[in-house]
Amino acid sequence: MTETKLISYIITDFISKSEMRMAEISWQEIINKYSEKLKKAGALRQTISRIWDKDNVYRLGHHWEYKDDSAFNECQKIFKLAEKEFKKETGIVWKISSNRGILTSETKF
């Protein structure tokens, strides 16, 4: 099994396709600024996906992997800074829904 012990999956909804795309680019630029701090805090991986299986819904999925719950808690402090910067730079309003879980099994294909 990988060193990932905890995952977080965050869904963000936007009012338009253009805001979703702008948010995707802006968020990644901001997160890249914090990448060394996130790595040091215990973040292992981030992926972003465009969720496309709903008509007229503009949604991104953010999948995060952490070494453990302590790493998750440390990264939350960094995310608060990143979110504040995102709001200040873009003015985009997003609806956030978060889910977290402990990795219990893994299958690689």
Image: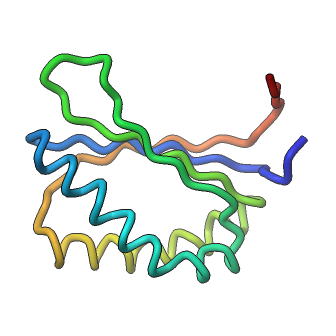
Position of residue 42 relative to residue 106, above or below, is below
Q: Position of residue 17 (x, y in %)?
A: 13, 39
Between 81 and 21, the one lying in front of the other is 21
* Residue in the picture at 18% in, 28% down: 57
Give the quadrant of residue 49: top left
Q: Position of residue 50 (x, y in %)?
A: 35, 36
- Is 79 placed above or below 17 here? below
Q: Residue at x 45, y 81 (%)?
A: 33
Q: Is residue 63 left or right of residue 42?
A: left
User: Relative to residue 85, is residue 107 drawn left or right?
Assistant: right
Residue name at image x 83 percent, y 30 percent:
105
The colour scheme of the drawn protein is rainbow
Q: How many marks?
A: 0
Residue closer to the observer: 108 or 98: 108
Describe residue 62's horizontal placement relative to residue 101 as left or right.
left
The residue nearer to you, when weighing 26 against 97, is 26
Residue 14 coordinates in the image, percent (x, y): 17, 43
Which residue lies most toward the right here? 1
Is residue 77 shown above or below 44? below
Q: Residue 58's x, y, as percent? A: 20, 35
Figure quadrant of the C terminus: top right
Q: Quadrant of the N terminus?
A: top right
- Quadrant position of residue 12: top left
